[in-house]
Amino acid sequence: MNKDVAVKWFKQAVHDLEMAEKNITIEGYDIAAFLIHQAVEKLLKSIIALRGMKIPKIHYLDELGRILHLPESMLQDLMDFVPDYMFARYPDIAEHVPYEEYDEEIVKAKLKHAKSIFKNLEKYYAELKEKDDE
């Protein structure tokens, strides 16, 4: 992979996080939860690409974190979003309809957590921000 590919993944990660925030304002809490997961996933994949590795076609954030050799504490942080990849979209995953399970408080907490992950991983992708600013 090259830096241009990493920048594309990074830009989409940032966009997904912005769209999650906008969905909160229209009470699209389930969609926001899914987009938050996607934002974190794409951020991790941008770092993988930046390191010259092939981007795996998986959605498990903890596995992506292990590929990056992130510390255990970060892997635990990533686990908070793993269920949202499926649970936020499919009504046969749990007993309830997904949109009925999310509310503003839950999703705002997820958004805050995702933003802290972006901040904590910034040293891994700082050069992508610089390239994006050009």
Image (cartoon, grey):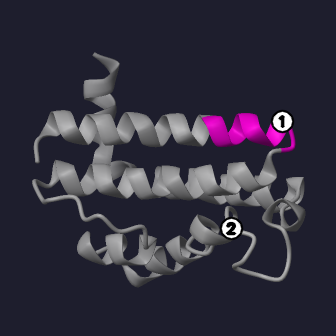
Is 23 covered by the magenta stretch?
yes
Q: Is residue 113 left or right of residue 61?
A: right
Q: In this image, 81 relative to 56: left or right? A: right
Measuring from the top left, give residue 119's x and y in whole percent. Answer: 49, 50
Asked whether 21 falls inside the magenta stretch, the response is yes
Secondary structure, magenta segment, majority class? helix
**Residue farthest to the front, as pictured:** 92
What residue range appears in magenta?
Answer: 19-27
Q: Mark 1 points at which residue?
A: 25
Residue type for callout 2: Tyr
Badge 1 or badge 2: first in the primary sequence: 1
Could you say which is closer to the camera, residue 15 or residue 120? 15
* Percent coordinates x, y for residue 82 in the rendering: 55, 73
**134 in relation to 59, above or below:** above
Q: Which amino acid does label 1 sit on?
A: Thr
Q: In x, y percent, where is residue 88?
A: 70, 64
Of 74 and 34, nearer the camera is: 34
Look at the image and tell me whether residue 124 can be seen: no
CB-based contact (under 8 Å), mark 1 and mark 2: no
Residue at (14% x, 55% y) in the render? 51
What secondary structure is marked by label 2? loop
Residue 28 vs 38, above or below: the answer is above
Picture residue at 27% right of the left edge, 35% below the top: 7
The structure residue drawn at horizontal position 39% and vertical position 51%, both measured from the top left corner, is 43
Quarter occupied by residue 132: top left
Q: Which mark is on residue 90?
A: 2
Is any atom of residue 34 visible in this view? yes
Residue 55 in picture, x, y percent from top left: 22, 58
**Comparing labels 1 and 2, the label whose residue is closer to the camera:** 2
